[in-house]
Amino acid sequence: MKSSCEQCGRLTGEKEVAYICSFECTFCESCTTKMGAICPNCSGELLLRPKRLKKPLDVAKSQLKAKLFGR
Ligand SMILES: [Zn+2]
Ligand SMILES: [Zn+2]
């Protein structure tokens, strides 16, 4: 996950709105709008990045729990 826009350098941290392509090129909302939601690096579609609400460690823990108690 990149923490700044590749076009203008604006922060696109975990709590910011950001758009990414399938190669994880990351752009802020205003650059994405300007570029017509097309990645200038790979010509791919830019999609709204899912928000990350938990820390990676917490997610790993729940995944482990699901494995242990899932069945
Ligand atoms: Zn930008
Ligand atoms: Zn790209």
Image: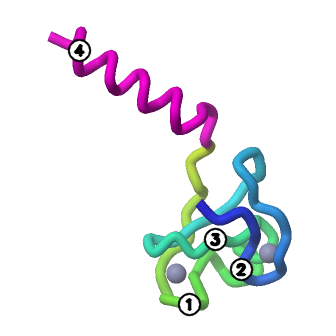
Disc 4 + disc 2, Cβ < 8 Å: no
Mark-to-mark CA distance, 4 and 3: 35 Å
Q: Which mark is residue 26?
A: 3
Q: In the image, what residue occupies the spot 62% across and 43% down?
A: 51
Mark-to-mark CA distance, 4 and 2: 40 Å
Decide which of tag 1 and tag 3 comes sooner along the chain. Answer: 3
Disc 2 + disc 3, Cβ < 8 Å: yes
> Counting other residues with Cα less than 10 Å from the Cα at mark 4, is it few (<14), some (14-19), or many (20 or more)?
few
> Counting other residues with Cα less than 10 Å from the Cα at mark 1, is it few (<14), some (14-19), or many (20 or more)?
few
Q: Amino acid at mark 3?
A: Thr
Q: In the image, what residue occupies the spot 47% across and 81% down?
A: 44
Q: Amino acid at mark 1?
A: Asn
Decide which of tag 2 and tag 3 comes sooner along the chain. Answer: 2
Disc tally is: 4
Q: Is 27 drawn above or below residue 3 in the view shown?
A: below
Q: Which mark is residue 53?
A: none
